[in-house]
Every structure is written in C-alpha cells, then in structure tokens.
C-alpha cells in the first residue's frame, strides 16, 4: 500500500474550506434545508456491516469543497455529511474527486479518478475511522483497487441563475457508494508475519493482509445528495 493512496484523504479538509460563498436569493430545491448562506443542501447516508448508521444531513451539516483546475475537467470536489447529537458525531466524506466536470455529468464513467471515502464515528473520547485505503489493504481482491474506489453518479448537474458575477450556481443531484475498512492501529505480530510468510512463499497477494487474523472490519457506505452550491465563476466550466 503506497502512501500516495492516503494523500487525497489528507487534503479533504483543506479543500473543503475553498467552497464558494452564497448570495441572499438562492433557489431552494425541494427536500433540502438551507445552510447559513441560504443554499439548499441535503445528503442521505446508509452505512452497513461492522457499523450501522442511517441519517440525513441538511443545510450546514452538508459540506461541499471545490478547487478549480487550470485545465478543462481538472476540478477537485469533496462532499461530506455530518451528524451530531448528545456527544456523538458521525461523518461520511467523499473525495477529493479529481477531474470533476460541470459540463459532463457522465465523465466519471470515463476519466474521473475517485480518491477515497471515509466513515468516521466518535462517542465522547472514543472514535473509529473506516476508509477506502484500509479496505484495499485488508479486503480488496482486485489488484487495481476497483473495489476500493468511490462510485459517484450524477443524475443531474444543472446551472442556475446567479446574481453574483463572481459565482456560478449549480444544483448537483446524485448517488454514491464505497467500501471502507477499520484497520488496527498497530497490526499484531501474527498479522504481519502471516502476510510476510505468504508473500515469501507464494508472491504478491490481494489483499495483502488476512482481515480476520488482523482484526480488520469493513462497511459499505451509500446514499444520495441534492445540493445547490455557489462555485467560483469560470469563463468555461470545467
């Protein structure tokens, strides 16, 4: 597992701060609550497996990050859905998605690279984080990591009227799904020795580690989104 697979996840928080600012007269899609800037956003989340969650995030609980690329189709996008109640906090995040294009909703089937998803849960001081990188290490039998990538499908990308010349307003509607895993912070000796022994005797294996022996756990995260967001205006959308 190369460190570069984790880099996009580390960049998510930074990119999420780059979302455009809304104005005072947004269109409000049905089924979504407005955030503090007046932009309508909603995401549904279903997590099953070693962890089970079901919730809907609305308004400010939905995060959208965007970093415009210099070349057409080179934009970066992140999405997240938070839930907080009585000391508990859950978050499902996607991205950054490299190669996102406003002009071509079907581009993800051709060239978009999906660089990770994450499910984080916290109760008081206890926390756990399931991610696609760990899924690749402990569960993905595909060498290319096909089962460890986020599947993101847009049913609609609609450009709306914006009263701010510096911002382009879009409505994004779609679904997502990804596999993620919780791996031990410090793998046991039995875990690492078994992986090394197998590699020495048989060569490369996918996944590289025995999930049961190592104590790894997996989940499937899926859901839908209906988001209206302002993005930095471009002469020609990526």
Image (cartoon, helix red, strand yellow):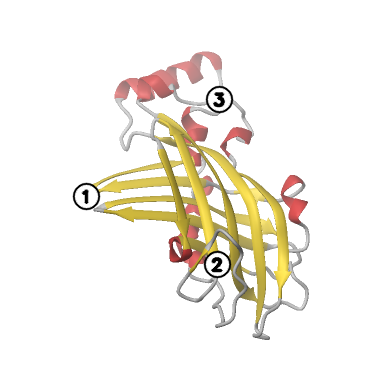
The CA span between labels 1 and 3 is 36 Å
User: Residue 222, position in %: x, y?
Assistant: 54, 41
Query: Which residue in the protein does label 2 denote?
Result: 40
Q: Residues within 10 Å of mark 3 (few under 14, many from 20)?
A: some
Task: Point out which mark residue 153 bears.
Answer: none
Mark 2, secondary structure of its residue: strand
Tag 1 or tag 2, which sits nearer the N-term?
2
Taking 74 as reference, is 217 left or right?
Answer: left
Q: Residues within 10 Å of mark 1 (few under 14, many from 20)?
A: few
The CA span between labels 3 and 2 is 42 Å
User: Residue 104, position in %: x, y?
Assistant: 78, 58
Q: Nearer the viewer, residue 224 or 166?
A: 224
Taking 99 as reference, is 85 left or right?
Answer: left
Residue 207 vs 128, above or below: the answer is above
Query: Which residue in the protein does label 1 denote?
Result: 124
Foreground disc of the pair 2, 1:
2
**Proximity of marks 3 and 2: CB atoms separated by less than 8 Å:** no
User: Residue 169, position in %: x, y?
Assistant: 66, 73
Query: Which residue in the protein does label 3 denote?
Result: 206
Residue 3 visible in rendering: no
Residue 12 visible in rendering: yes
Residue 60, quarter of picture: bottom left
Residue 70 vs 104, above or below: the answer is below
Mark 3, secondary structure of its residue: loop
Tag 2 or tag 3, which sits nearer the N-term?
2
Q: Which quarter of the figure is the C terminus placed in? A: bottom right
**Proximity of marks 1 and 3: CB atoms separated by less than 8 Å:** no
- Report the residue that reaches farthest toward the left: 125
Q: Residues within 10 Å of mark 2 (few under 14, many from 20)?
A: many
């Amino acid at each position: 597992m190369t460190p570069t697979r984790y880099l996009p996840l580390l960049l998510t928080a930074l990119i999420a701060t780059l979302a455009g600012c809304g104005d005072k007269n947004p269109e409000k899609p049905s089924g979504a609550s407005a955030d503090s800037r007046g932009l309508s956003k909603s995401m549904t989340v279903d997590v099953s497996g070693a962890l089970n969650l079901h919730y809907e995030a609305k308004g400010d609980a939905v995060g959208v990050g965007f970093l415009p690329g210099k070349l057409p189709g080179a934009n970066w996008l992140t999405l997240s859905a938070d839930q907080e109640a009585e000391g508990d906090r859950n978050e499902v995040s996607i991205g950054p998605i490299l190669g996102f294009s406003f002009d071509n909703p079907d581009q993800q089937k051709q060239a978009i690279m999906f660089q990770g998803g994450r499910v984080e849960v916290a109760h008081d001081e206890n926390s756990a984080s399931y991610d696609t990188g760990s899924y690749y290490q402990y569960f993905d039998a595909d060498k290319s990591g096909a089962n460890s990538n986020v599947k993101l499908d847009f049913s609609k990308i609609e450009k709306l009227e914006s009263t701010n010349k510096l911002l382009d307003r879009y409505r994004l509607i779609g679904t997502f799904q990804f596999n993620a895993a919780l791996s031990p912070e410090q793998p046991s000796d039995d875990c690492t020795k078994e992986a090394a022994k197998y590699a020495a005797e048989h060569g490369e294996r996918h996944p590289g580690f025995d999930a049961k022996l190592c104590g790894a756990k997996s989940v499937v995260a899926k859901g839908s989104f209906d988001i209206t967001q302002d993005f930095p205006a471009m002469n020609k959308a990526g």
